[in-house]
Image (cartoon, helix red, strand yellow):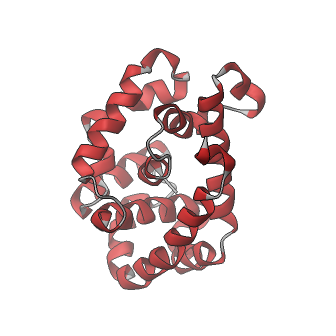
């Protein structure tokens, strides 16, 4: 899962959300330098990633697009699933997506000085380009994929990801709706989530 799903799965705990957001930039035991709630968010992020990577429905989604993206298929599926979450946001949250996104940006900006350097570099772009809400529409999604493809020196083929999504939209959307409710149940059972 990508940024939007991780934020959504953090619930109402700001520190948990912060930890969930920075987790990819925190390696190994570096998490010990953070407050317990932030540590819990980092641990939760890792569990979400592990659950997602091992889930058979996610594997089916990756197989559907592997011919186009090879080793990058997992990353592409994560973003496709964030698109389906954003596009169907009202089924998963009573709060409007724009309001939710603005709140996430405020939580992260308030803790700006605590961000690891890698996360520190992307946060201004995340906010300025409103990544969380922009996953909902295909025009903005195309821009996100183009930027990612550029960072891989166009080896990933991600600049063509929206076209692949459009060709496989219903099948991939079906996969998302099979998978995401199971992920929500899994996350709600985690001890980090209940603190």
Q: Is residue 18 left or right of residue 26?
A: left
Q: Is residue 125 left or right of residue 80?
A: left
Task: Where is residue 187? Give x, y as percent.
Answer: 60, 57
Residue in the picture at 53% in, 58% down: 75
Residue in the picture at 34% in, 50% down: 144
Report which quarter residue 84 is drawn in. bottom left
Q: What is the total number of numbered labels drawn onto the structure image?
A: 0
100 up-or-down from 158: above or below: above
The residue lying furthest to the right in this view is: 29
Residue in the picture at 54% in, 73% down: 179
Task: Where is residue 48? Give x, y as percent.
Answer: 62, 55
Task: Where is residue 101? Give x, y as percent.
Answer: 30, 43
Q: Is residue 160 visible?
A: no
Q: Is residue 65 left or right of residue 122?
A: right
Report which quarter residue 170 is drawn in. bottom left
In the foreground, 68 or 187: 187
The residue lying furthest to the front in this view is: 195
140 up-or-down from 100: above or below: below
Q: Quadrant of the C terminus?
A: top right
82 up-or-down from 22: above or below: below
Q: Is residue 93 visible?
A: yes
Residue in the picture at 64% in, 22% down: 34
């Amino acid at each position: 899962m990508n940024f939007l799903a991780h934020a959504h799965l953090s619930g109402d705990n700001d520190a948990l959300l912060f930890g969930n957001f920075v987790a990819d930039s925190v390696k190994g035991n570096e998490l010990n330098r953070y407050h317990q709630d932030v540590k819990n968010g980092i641990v939760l992020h890792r569990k979400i990633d592990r659950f997602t990577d091992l889930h058979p429905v996610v594997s089916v989604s990756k197989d559907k697009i592997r011919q186009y993206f090879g080793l990058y298929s997992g990353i592409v599926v994560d973003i496709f699933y964030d698109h389906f979450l954003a596009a169907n946001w009202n089924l998963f949250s009573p709060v409007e997506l724009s309001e939710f996104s603005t709140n996430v940006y405020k939580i992260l900006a308030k803790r700006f000085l605590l961000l690891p350097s890698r996360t520190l570099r992307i946060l201004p772009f995340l906010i300025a380009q409103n990544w969380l809400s922009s996953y909902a529409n295909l025009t903005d999604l195309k821009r996100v994929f183009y930027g990612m493809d550029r960072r891989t020196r166009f080896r990933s083929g991600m600049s063509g990801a929206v076209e692949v999504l459009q060709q496989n939209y219903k099948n991939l959307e079906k996969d998302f709706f099979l998978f995401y409710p199971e992920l929500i149940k899994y996350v709600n059972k985690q001890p980090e989530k209940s603190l």
